[in-house]
Image: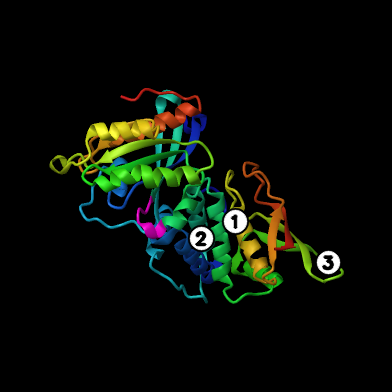
Amino acid sequence: MTDAQMKQWTFKILVLGDMAVGKTSLINQYIEHTFLEDYRPTLGVNIISKDIEIEQIGSLIRLIFWDIAGQDKYENCRKAYYEGCSGVLLVYDITRHDTFINVESKWMKDLLNNIRRKCDFLLIGNKVDLKNNRVVTYEEGKSLAEKISAIDFIETSALNGQNVEKAFLRLIHRILKQFGENFEID
Amino acid sequence: MIGDYKGEVNNKVLTALMQAYLDVLDYDGLKSILREAELLELKDIRDFNSNKSIDFFSFKKIISAQNCLLFGCYNLLFEIGKKFSFYLFPYGKNFEEIIIELNYLIKTNWNIEILDKSQNYMTNELETITLEIQNCIFCSEVGVPCNFIVGFLVHSLEKSLPSNREITFSGLKDPHDPSHNSFILKLISKKK
């Protein structure tokens, strides 16, 4: 099948969560399979596109990730960034309990107040490589995902790549399903 | 990018556009657009030499990157268009002069022209301005809404009028219409 014969999709995906939970690192790991040791906070929004092909459904998909700064100073402009999103990755850090609490009390609230159309979101507990510092259990994460009606809950490590691809693909799978397209995830 | 991209764009336009990105998307947002345009080397230049120009092809690469990354962001494009007007003409200017100067600063196969103006015959206040936009370079891709140029025009008119006036608009085509970047825009001035 040539590119011209394939169905073309564009999806805007937001990545939300407190500062330093690993949003940028997750995207870097998914797109480039890299991890930068130095932490540099995002200023405003980092927007990155990635084109993927899903042969099973003959589709070319352009993913546009909006990695939105987690700092409070961006609270006002952040709302404008939500427009037109198709899906959301909500991220917390399993070693910092406040980031877990803020998923529901801050990010979900913010999201629901500012999106006009229905969009799917997936909950991610990041930094599972730091298992000795874990303060949020898997069960707590799972339970929160059910409470906020997330499509799934996945624990990841942006450092070693564990489950990163799976989390992104799971969200893309769900978005495409809304458009009547279904494919198998390995 | 497919097509013929001949022409040149005065550096003032580039400076104003970079400032608009910084205001609305901050530093990482600006870098994202320049990275997508493969022109990241421009990221730390705040004041380009206004006596010089860049080639239209490079400028169009930035606009295409903007339109790709800001897919579906109608309000943000409008906001960036407004900021672009603010930085391109910071000291305010007569609306007619702004249109003439914009055509002069961006020299390529496009045109913006005022077709008609109507005023209230009692108060002499402006009521409507009708513009013809041909081959708008800011929204030439199919699917990209014309909100950037409309934001620019709305803000440019707004700042040339008394502060008690607000501007609404009509005339946008469906962005999926391949000829949507040539259109007749009506700007309507009303008391707030």
On the same chain: label 3 and label 2?
A: yes
Residue A124 is at least partly visible in this image: yes
Q: Is residue A158 above or below residue B181?
A: above
Disc 1 from disc 3: Cα separation:
33 Å
Chain letter for mark 2 = B
Q: Nearer the viewer, residue A68 or B109?
A: A68
Q: Say few, some or many: other residues with alpha carbon within 10 Å of mark 3 (under 14 / 14 to 19 / 20 or more).
A: few
Q: How many marks?
A: 3
Label pair 1/2, CB-CB below 8 angstroms: yes
Which residue type does callout 3 highlight? Asn
Quarter assignment of residue A143: top left
Task: Say if labels 1 and 2 share a chain.
Answer: yes
Residue with the mark numbered 3: B120
- Is residue B104 toward the left or the right of residue A26 in the image? right
Disc 2 residue crowd, few under 14, some 14–19, many 20+, Cα 10 Å: many
Relative image position of residue A108 (x, y in whole percent): 41, 42
- Looking at marks 1 and 2 on the same chain, the residue that comes earlier in the sequence is marked by 2
Judge whether residue A158 is colored magenta.
no
Q: CA distance from mark 1 to mark 2?
A: 10 Å
Residues indicated by labels 1 and 3 sit on the same polypeptide chain:
yes
Inter-mark Cα distance, 3 to 2: 40 Å
Q: Which residue occupies the foreground of this view, B110 or A117?
A: A117
Give the amino acid type for the residue marked by disc 1 in the picture: Ile
Residue pointed to by mark 2: B59
Task: Identify the magenta region.
Answer: A68-74
